[in-house]
Image (cartoon, helix red, strand yellow):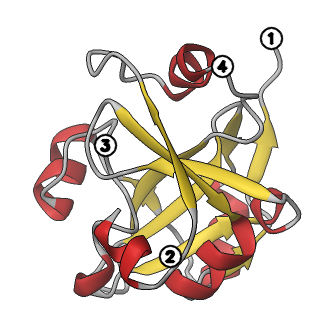
Amino acid sequence: MRLLEARAIPYETHNYDPTIRDAEAVARAVGLPAAEVFKTLVVERPAKKKPVLVMLPCDCTLNMKRLAKALGEKKVALAPHAAAERLTGLQVGGISALALMQKQWDVCLDVRGSTSAHIVISAGQRGTQLRLEASALIKLLNCRIVDVADQTTE
């Protein structure tokens, strides 16, 4: 939040019970559409040492084959929760590209985020989400726009 304030990027905070770890449950808890609430996944790239952060709507699943192709990799793998926490220093459910800016992670944003007016992401800790303009987030994080999300069917 300090980063956004320092750059005069307006945002709204949405708080929820920090014991909730599922992104779709977070969307329900804060009363926002699942398509607007994005989860951040840590994806390992065998060819490169540093993983990539991938943000996609919480009601979607990550298409690993399309992500690998978009990154120019033969193969990528979703980091297990323990590895994601070790790599980022953040808890699963609170992983945020904003909190990792100084570590200069590559950040991919699913195309659905680039076509939205606003996007909701973790503030860097469980229990707090930030809603801000998608275009401001894309510019701030220098996001690579990728088409890697598949709609979850229930």
Classify residue 19 as left or right of residue 33.
left
Q: CA distance from mark 3 to mark 2?
A: 16 Å
Q: CA distance from mark 4 to mark 1?
A: 20 Å
Marks 4,1: beta carbons within 8 A: no
Residue at 45% from the left image edge and 85% from the top image edge: 7
Q: CA distance from mark 2 to mark 4?
A: 26 Å
Q: Which residue is mark 4?
A: 31
Marks 2,1: beta carbons within 8 A: no
Identify whether 39 is placed above or below 135: above
Dividing the picture into quarters, in which one does residue 6 lie? bottom left
Marks 2,4: beta carbons within 8 A: no
Q: Earlier in the sequence, mark 3 or mark 2?
A: 3
SS at circle 2: strand
Q: Position of residue 100 (x, y in %)?
A: 28, 72
Classify residue 120 as left or right of residue 92.
right
Amino acid bearing label 4? Gly
Amino acid bearing label 2? Val
Q: Label 4 neighbourhood size at 10 Å, few (<14), some (14-19), many (20+)? A: few
Q: Label 2 neighbourhood size at 10 Å, few (<14), some (14-19), many (20+)? A: many
Q: Position of residue 2 (x, y in %)?
A: 30, 69
Q: Which residue is mark 1?
A: 154
**Residue 49 visible, this angle:** no
Q: CA distance from mark 3 to mark 4?
A: 18 Å
Marks 1,3: beta carbons within 8 A: no
Dividing the picture into quarters, in which one does residue 112 lie? bottom right
Q: Determine which of the numbered discs, if any, sits on residue 107 in the image.
A: 2
SS at circle 1: loop
Q: Which residue is mark 3?
A: 94
Q: CA distance from mark 1 to mark 3?
A: 25 Å
Q: Determine which of the numbered discs, if any, sits on residue 67 in the image.
A: none
